[in-house]
Amino acid sequence: MPEYRTFTHDVLIVGAGGAGLRAAIEASASGVTVGLVSKSLLGKAHTVMAEGGVAAALANVDERDGWRVHFADTMRGGQYMNHPRMAELHAREAPDRVRELEAWGAVFDRTKDGKILQRNFGGHKYPRLAHVGDRTGLEMIRTLQDHGIHLGIDVHMEHTIVALLKDGSRIAGAFAYDRERGRFKVFHAKAVVLATGGIGRAYRITSNSWEYTGDGHSLAYHAGASLKDMEFVQFHPTGMVWPPSVRGILVTEGVRGEGGVLRNKDGKRFMFGDIPENYRAQTADNEEEGWRYTQGDKNARRPPELLTRDHVARCIMREVREGRGSPHGGVFLDIAWIKERLPKGEEHIKRKLPSMYHQFKQLAGIDITREPMEVGPTTHYMMGGVNVDPDTQMSDVPGLFAAGECAAGLHGANRLGGNSLSDLIVFGKRAGEYAAKFAKANSAPQLDNSQLEALARHALEPFERDTAENPYQIQHELQDRMQDLAGIVRRQEEMEKALEIIEALKQRAARASVKGNREFNPGWHTALDLQNLLTVSEAITRAAIERKESRGAHFRDDFPGKNAAEGAVNIIIRKTPGGAMSVSREPVPPMNEELKQIIEEMK
Amino acid sequence: MSGQVTFRIWRGEKGAGELRDYTTEISSGMVVLDVVHKIQATQANDLACRWNCKAGKCGSCSAEINGMPRLMCMTRMSDLPLDKPITIEPVRAFPHLRDLVTDVSWNYEVKKKIRKYQPRKPDNPDGTWSMEQDDIDRVQEFRKCIECYLCQDVCHVLREHSLHSKFIGPRFLVYSAALEMHPADTANRLPELKDDFGIGYCNITKCCTKVCPESIAITDNAIIPLKERVVDRYYDPLKRIFRAITGSGGD
């Protein structure tokens, strides 16, 4: 029988990016014992990749901003598929969460009068993103990490959870292995917070790291929690496209916020040609006005490059498909042109976008202060996730919470840039707070030893098989197929084909074989991650088949328009007692009168 | 750029092992990490290496490439001589675990010992501080650090003399400098820097600065000013007399 050690914590947090760290800090501050499991080393989570900023209506740069405007922007961007209560809490609480980061040592860029500076971003009416150049995520994770290490949190670095444990209907902990030695560990906990991030590794072209295999989504689903909005996968409009090995790496929206423009091969700013009706009143209709907006003119409207990500991504795809793309299948993003308008433009670009300058210089040999970048859509963010209570972040499973990217509700059909970092700290805090309350109010759950043995045996099976099924090949094939069949543009028959392929890949994954031993063996880790990738891929595809309209990030070639009846429901995924994946519909949660009035006023 | 390349990768556990050759095809624009991934996916599924962002932002994939400490994700194949095998070895300043992976936990322990940020009372009623951009530029430079620990790897105090118990290394001198130079911080870390953190061991050879992927001027902007503060505090005779007379701060 495989051996394992048991660790007991009141609250177990799975994931140590922004949401997990913030949850751990909050739970710890309320006096419960906290274990924090991180798939990589502490401080390396995907939060470090966030570039542009954290959205909060501090109104430091434009006094007209406030939580009401932020709420309305978030709902409009999400095509009203958002949980309105989550969007409200997020808009109301984000400013305090940002100020709290400063109290913990974050050093944001400043306004001339010494306050936290805010920048423009797609879909935000006013300059709202607190930032540090284009490395805001690094600043945030390092601040939370450096604050958190002094609070007595038990950090389990380089551990991966393979299953959640239950005692009857409630959560009882989690079963894990450590990467270094491959030993199994049992985390016995009264409450578990999932903060595992997204699913980008289900696709070939992605801005996401190896960790992003949908672990939280899949763990929650197999533990009986429902998932929501899984059809809404955000393809960020600007990923690098050349050279091939860097395809998908993110190019921050901050480039456009600072005045960068999108052009096709004919040099035309094509975004002016396609401005959606519900954004027309807020969008500049000429280049001059757009430029003035990026330079802080409060009377100017934003340029169409700063429309929502779903829309910009589709416009880029259209230019490429219709033969007006750049040499390597993208379009041009030009920031160098601002030198015509700004004295010391070159230094300005390097100062405001230092990571982008280095990224292109080092990886593509391109100097962005002189030449345009080539960009195209990349799988970036999962709006869908664990279906949670908006106030407490608890799922349908008592004691199981979720926060950040792996939870659903805040972003609806499309997330606005900058609303992710704020999501992490607003709902990370709430999840930590309510998980601690749950732990205090409940006794310790019982663990089922027979379940542990079965999990350990199952996890070791890939070593016992001697087949030719290489887990990396299975993963690559899944990524290719999801990219082609359930990507930015979707069709019924292609997605049905995707389901058949996912089924076949599940069979192959069950035969996957790994060599070597259990110590730091990435082949084994890849084999174990496959279950999660296959689960989320199936959930995405089934939800996408169910939604017979195009809305936000979900675009159906066979149903290209919006449909009011479809827009009134969220799609819910559950595991049936028999083990099959069920798809159902629930009405979008209604707005109260105050929120309705805000939406009406801001139209 | 395309064709065949041979990678000579350190394989083994706990310091015991050997360099093993892997030959593979490369294509245009590849970085060293791409090639390592390709070898891992096709020839050596259990090849251990760390990576996350693949964009020079997380600092996970540090290794010694042809003997030079670098991030694998930011080293382009076109910048390496391809006519002979390219050696890829783990960093040397930390205990070896497996293949390209080392035990970097010492760094996390060191950081915990450094006094955390202690701000003065907020300047404004909403709990915020007023700070000029000019006053935080230097701190922001230090906060660019991605904790790849390449500076620790090349520091001879750690790499050759293994004084890990007496010296915190360039990374944590930069971290201390970011706290000490923060305009709103009130803590004093000079006593520890002098006694426990061994700032005197650094003899400013600037090896750390040379390998920093974030181009932080580690020696000039962080370590030398910190050394000066320590000297001013403990070794300046005039200031000692002044403190003795005024009774400000004990020695």
Image (cartoon, coloured by chain):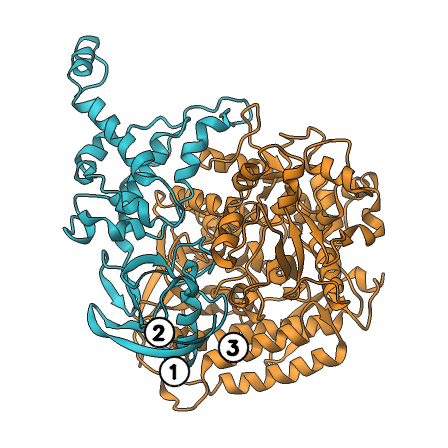
Chain colours: A orange, B cyan
Q: Please, what secondary structure does the residue beneath circle 3 have?
A: helix
Q: Amino acid at mark 3?
A: Gln
Q: Which residue is tagged 3? A: A475
Q: Where A367 sits versus A491, above or below?
A: above
Q: Where B65 sits versus A501, above or below?
A: above
Q: Where A16 sits versus A98, above or below?
A: below
Count of marks, rendered view: 3
| Residues at marks 1 and 3 touching, judged by CB atoms closer than 8 Å | no
Q: Write down the chain letter for disc 1.
A: A
Q: Residues within 10 Å of mark 1 (few under 14, many from 20)?
A: many
Q: CA distance from mark 2 to mark 1?
A: 9 Å
Nearer-the-camera pick, A75 or A325: A325
> Looking at the rendered structure, which numbered label has been put on residue B34?
none
Name the quadrant of the C terminus of chain A: top right
Q: Write down the chain letter for disc 2.
A: A
Q: Residues within 10 Å of mark 2 (few under 14, many from 20)?
A: many
N-term-proximal mark, 2 vs 1: 1
Q: CA distance from mark 2 to mark 3?
A: 16 Å
Q: Please, what secondary structure does the residue beneath circle 1 have?
A: loop
Q: Residues within 10 Å of mark 3 (few under 14, many from 20)?
A: many
Q: Which residue is tagged 2? A: A521
Q: Which residue is tagged 1? A: A514
Question: Is residue A232 left or right of B161 when viewed as pictured?
Answer: right
Q: Quadrant of residue A380?
A: bottom right
Q: Write down the chain letter for disc 3.
A: A
Q: Are marks 2 and 1 on the same chain?
A: yes
Q: Residue at left 41%, top 52%?
A: A43
Q: Quadrant of residue A113?
A: top right
N-term-proximal mark, 2 vs 3: 3
